[in-house]
Image (cartoon, helix red, strand yellow):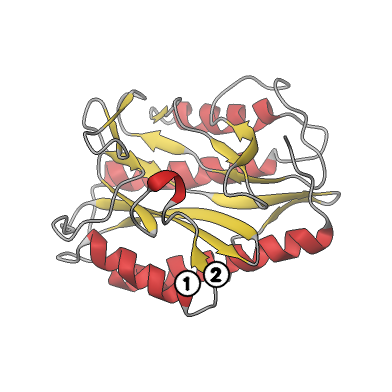
């Protein structure tokens, strides 16, 4: 079921997403060589709780941590670990969910750990660009396929690949709602977009093949060929005046 939100509900969802945006901005100064993904997770959890909110991923479907932290060839859903320390030249995707007063937000950002290669730097740039191209298609009376097509076209024009098995989603009254928002597809296909929808658009883009698999922990999704993967996400409200990015701060 697709939940259309009132203006008041959108503002409640925005409050959650602003906390996420602030948390991601805050954690950037901790992303450096030698830091463990467990330390990053604990910093973000503390940041969220101090703002009278809760990390919505913790316990969701049994997930054991507050955030999903995915390094290098880990696409998404990486479990933070004291043993996994960051190394210079790596990239790390941090996906954060927040619940406050019965509403939810969701956003993600991929950070560079020190100096990264030009090829991986381009991967980050193209992935983030594809997110905003998808957002630009988030207009009432367009279709979900228009979002995915815009993302896929930009990614593949730059010789990268879009993950197929994982998609964006509705968000707001629950952490995951309908409709699904694939990062690939054909224009003018799929669910019709309507004012009042709130959706999380999240391209996951691989340097190599689009193929992925689940690691032994049954959570972490990794690239089959071992290539690095980038992930960017925003929560968007569809309005009569176009897309409103709820998880964006100056």
Give the x, y percent position of residue 168: 55, 38
Q: Are marks 1 and 2 in contact (CB under 8 Å)?
A: yes
Give the x, y percent position of residue 53: 54, 71
Q: Is residue 131 visible?
A: yes
* Count of picture labels: 2
The dot on residue 48 is 1
Question: Which SS class for mark 1?
Answer: helix
Residue occupying image coordinates x 38% and y 30%: 160
In this view, 43 is above or below 73: below
In this view, 116 is above or below 143: below
In this view, 4 is above or below 89: above
The dot on residue 19 is 2
Q: Is residue 114 visible?
A: no
Distance between the alpha carbons at the discs numbered 1 and 2? 7 Å
Give residue 144's quadrant in the image.
Answer: top right
Question: Which SS class for mark 2?
Answer: helix
């Amino acid at each position: 079921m697709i939940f259309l939100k009132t203006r008041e509900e959108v503002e409640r969802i925005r409050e959650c997403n602003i906390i996420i945006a602030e948390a991601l901005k805050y954690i950037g100064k901790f992303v450096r060589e030698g830091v463990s993904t467990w330390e990053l997770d604990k910093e973000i959890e503390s940041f969220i709780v101090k703002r009278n909110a809760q990390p919505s991923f913790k316990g969701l479907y049994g997930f054991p941590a507050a955030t999903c932290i995915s390094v290098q060839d880990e696409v998404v859903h990486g479990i933070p670990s004291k043993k996994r320390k960051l190394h210079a030249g790596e990239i790390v995707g941090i996906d954060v969910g927040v619940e406050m007063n019965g509403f939810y937000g969701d956003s993600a950002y991929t950070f560079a750990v020190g100096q990264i290669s030009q090829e991986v730097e381009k991967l980050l740039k193209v992935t983030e660009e594809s997110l905003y191209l998808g957002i630009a298609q988030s207009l009432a009376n367009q279709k979900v396929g228009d979002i995915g097509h815009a993302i896929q076209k930009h990614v593949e024009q730059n010789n990268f690949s879009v993950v197929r098995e994982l998609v964006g989603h509705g968000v707001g009254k629950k952490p995951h709602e309908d409709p699904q928002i694939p990062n690939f597809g054909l224009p003018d296909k799929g669910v019709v977009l309507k004012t009042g929808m709130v959706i999380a658009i999240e391209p996951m883009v691989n340097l190599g093949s689009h193929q992925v698999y689940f690691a032994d922990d049954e959570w972490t999704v990794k690239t089959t060929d071992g290539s690095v993967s980038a992930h960017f996400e925003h929560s968007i409200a569809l309005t009569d005046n176009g897309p409103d990015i709820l998880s964006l701060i100056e």
